[in-house]
Image (tube, rainbow, N blue to C red):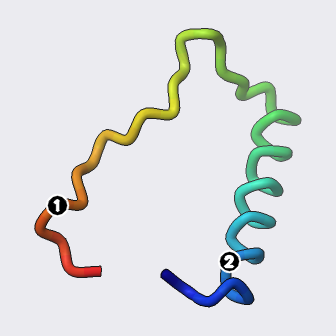
Amino acid sequence: MPPLALCGDNAAMIGAQGYYEYLAGNTGDMTLNAYATKSIIGETL
């Protein structure tokens, strides 16, 4: 787990990208989900 001080920037970048996607008209509908599709089992973190 990274230090908390290094986590905020990622949240800001994701929020900014979401804002620009919304302005461009790229929105999801009710079929969009947030389920992970990649396994992390066996990967070195």
Residue 25, above or below 2: above
For residue 9, which quarter of the picture? bottom right
Viewed as shown, does residue 28 lie left or right of 42?
Answer: right
Q: Which label belongs to residue 7? A: 2
State the image coordinates of residue 15 (x, y, percent, origin top left). Answer: 79, 54
Which of 7 and 20 lies nearest the eye of the viewer?
7
SS under mark 2: loop
Q: Residue furthest left?
A: 42
Q: Is residue 1 left or right of residue 23?
A: left
> Which residue is denoted by mark 1 in the rendering?
41
- Quadrant (top left/top right/bottom left/bottom right) for the C terminus: bottom left
Residue 42 picture quarter: bottom left
Q: Nearer the viewer, residue 9 or 42?
A: 42
In the displayed structure, 29 sits above or below 37; it is above
Q: CA distance from mark 1 to mark 2?
A: 23 Å
What residue is drawn where x is 82% and y is 46%? 20
The image shows residue 22 at horizontal and vertical percentages of: 82, 34
- Residues packed near mark 2 inside 10 Å, few (<14), some (14 to 19) or many (20 plus): few
Determine the residue positioned at 53% across, 11% down: 31
